[in-house]
Image (tube, grey):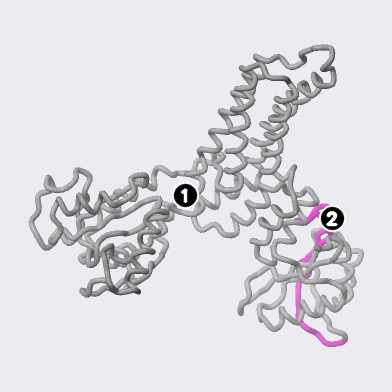
Amino acid sequence: MTNFEDTIIAPATPSGVSALAVIRVSGTNAISIVNSCFSKDINQAKGYTIHYGHILDGSQKVDEVLVSIFKNPQSYTGEDSVEISGHGSPYIVQRIIETILKKGARMAEPGEFTLRAFLNKKLDLTQAEAVADMISSNSEASLQMAIHQMRGGFSKDIAKLRQELIDFAALIELENDFGEEDVEFANRPKLKKLIESLLQQIETLRTSFSAGNVLKNGINTVIAGKPNAGKSTLLNALLNEDRAIVSDIAGTTRDTIEEIFTLEGIQFRLIDTAGLRDSTDNIEQIGVSKAKESIQKADLIIYLFDAQTTSPKQLEAELLELPTSQRLIILANKTDQLSYNAKDWPENTLFISAKTKNIDPLLDELLKIASQYEYGNETLVNNARHADALSKSSILLQKIIMGIDEEIPSDLIAIDIRNTLYQLGLITGEVTNDEVLDSIFTRFCIGK
């Protein structure tokens, strides 16, 4: 079991050769432990001060460093903390860590610095998760969304909802205490109006998950079609590099190829798939199976067909095999090599030539899709755990409304209110358990 009384240490910068590296130390004895192997006395140093000197292993100088002091509770973890800025040699970093370990510290576990910040009430759980989102952000939209959550935007929304429910829950519980006297402290019409208002707000948050997830993780986009339709050529044209092997031999792509394509700050997670056809080749069969799995999971399907060899009836049959729930872009490829009548094809068909990189119609359509996900600093749910808790809260609130309409006893209403409070508390960490914390913080890097 993790001992949070220990002083912990970990590199806060990535491994590898660099000009500088930062090593983080936190815990009750952080300052005294670093002091024991530092060339200057920092035991009485003030917080938010920086000290120049050397890390010493006995009489040997390990590195010339700057040591930054952070006193509790005004630190990231809420504990005494020290950050050592030294040279970025992996060997030097390891030597500094080994020297401090010998003085009584231990290696931090993944996410332990942020976990301690949560336990010391420096962050709530949604803010802690936003730290991880900020570190892994790969677009302006995902970064701004993470910053909004780190500043407590989502937490404030949930706290407000929860407090309104707590106030009414207290009245319901009071009724239960005076059950024999048949008194009603919680006005039922007012309670119903409150629950309906809470339900509307929670539904707004819950339904924002699809947009929030796109801003955080990108649009899962599958390029699908028959063999030799030009899927790999299209992937290369979008990326403007030779990422996928292109060949006239049908069935060249045997596995999925994934790459990131960013447009107007929105990521499209492009997945090039094996051509869809029946095959006796075992390896190609696996590739086709993977392609079908990717199609089922896609947010967006770009269906590419060879306009030279595919008839409108053939295309119609191919499209019937695709799921109808996902957004679909139909692309006629190789249109530089023939005369065609647009009326022969489905009304929304786009015409391109991947080989000559004439893909503007597709780019225009992707821009339209990207523009639907502009982030305006509003609260969006981008975490599956939060979305699940909101969905359960929504069901419980609907149950409460039904109970009020059916005039069920207040003690039964109180149970559903308590369960709703529990679900909302799970989001911010007011209610939690070790399993949830382990699941969240073990995904962090070791120095955070």
Tell which tag, 1 or 2, sits nearer the viewer: 1
- Say what secondary structure mark 2 lies in: loop
Does residue 440 lie above or below 290 as drawn?
above
Asked whether the beta carbons under mark 1 and mark 2 sit within 8 Å of each other, the answer is no
- Amino acid carrying mark 2 in the image: Asn
Q: Is residue 50 left or right of residue 309?
A: right
Quarter containing the C terminus = bottom right
Mark 2 highlights which residue? 72
Residue 282 at x, y = what percent? 34, 74
Which region of the structure is painted magenta?
A: 59-83
Q: Residue furthest right?
A: 44
Amino acid type for the residue under numbered disc 1: Val
The x, y position of residue 107, in whole percent, is 77, 71
Q: Residues within 10 Å of mark 1 (few under 14, many from 20)?
A: many
Taking the magenta stretch, the answer to whether it contains residue 72 is: yes
Labels 1 and 2: the sequence-earlier one: 2
> Which residue position holds label 1?
214
- How many neighbours does mark 2 have within 10 angstroms: few (below 14), some (14-19), or many (20 or more)? some
The CA distance from mark 1 to mark 2 is 38 Å
